[in-house]
Amino acid sequence: MQSLVKAFAQAKRLFMLSSAFMTVLIYAFFASPSVYASTIWTPVGGPGMLGAYAMANLNGTLYVGTGSGVEQLSKGAWSSIGPSNNVSYMTAMNGTLYVGDGSQGVYKYTGASWSPVGGPSNKLSSKTVQGLTSMNGVLYAGTFGGNVYGFQNGSWHVVGNTLSASITHL
């Protein structure tokens, strides 16, 4: 069984997502200003976290993409915020959370509702999204077909040449 480990730091806390043997644990290490390493980790994963695949920090809130949607950790409590799809990729940019669910394109969450990035005629809705990131105000999505798309000025466009292999991460 392959194990997945992802980590990121936020406000003197390090979060690590570990997925192995059909068990998902999310750990948080809270460091004081003088502590830089530790072997003491505290599990903070909520119920229903089986199959967690991605994490993002948006305005101090931890979001986790799971096999059944997005969970958020806010003020010590977990809550499900949807969508109910398998969310494997996510990134945060300019106060908005973006998620890629593999087969239905890219969606954005502004704190109240979800909507497809690019509107109902979302160019990526028929693409299998394999990676998602943002840089310099541009949202990028890598696809199974070997293309990288950039979302800018309200539309998706192909970035560079088509690769001969599928994108697996951005």
Image (cartoon, grey):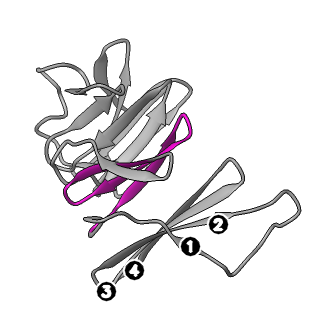
Disc 3 designates what residue? 21
Kindly state the secondary structure of the residue where label 2 is placed.
strand
**Marks 4 and 1, Cα distance to the nearest angstrom?**
19 Å
First in residue order: circle 3 vs circle 4: 4
Foreground mark, 2 or 4, reads 2
With 115 as the anchor, is 99 left or right in this view? right
Q: Position of residue 37 (x, y in %)?
A: 77, 72
Mark 4 neighbour class, 10 Å CA radius: few under 14, some 14 to 19, many 20 or more: few
Q: Main secondary structure of the magenta part?
A: strand
Disc 2 designates what residue? 29
Q: Which quadrant would the N terminus be assigned to in this image?
A: bottom left
For image coordinates 18% across by 48% down, the residue present is 128
Question: What amino acid is at disc 2?
Answer: Phe
Kindly state the secondary structure of the residue where label 3 is placed.
loop
Disc 4 designates what residue? 3
**Marks 2 and 4, Cα distance to the nearest angstrom?**
20 Å
Question: What amino acid is at disc 3?
Answer: Phe
Disc 1 designates what residue? 42
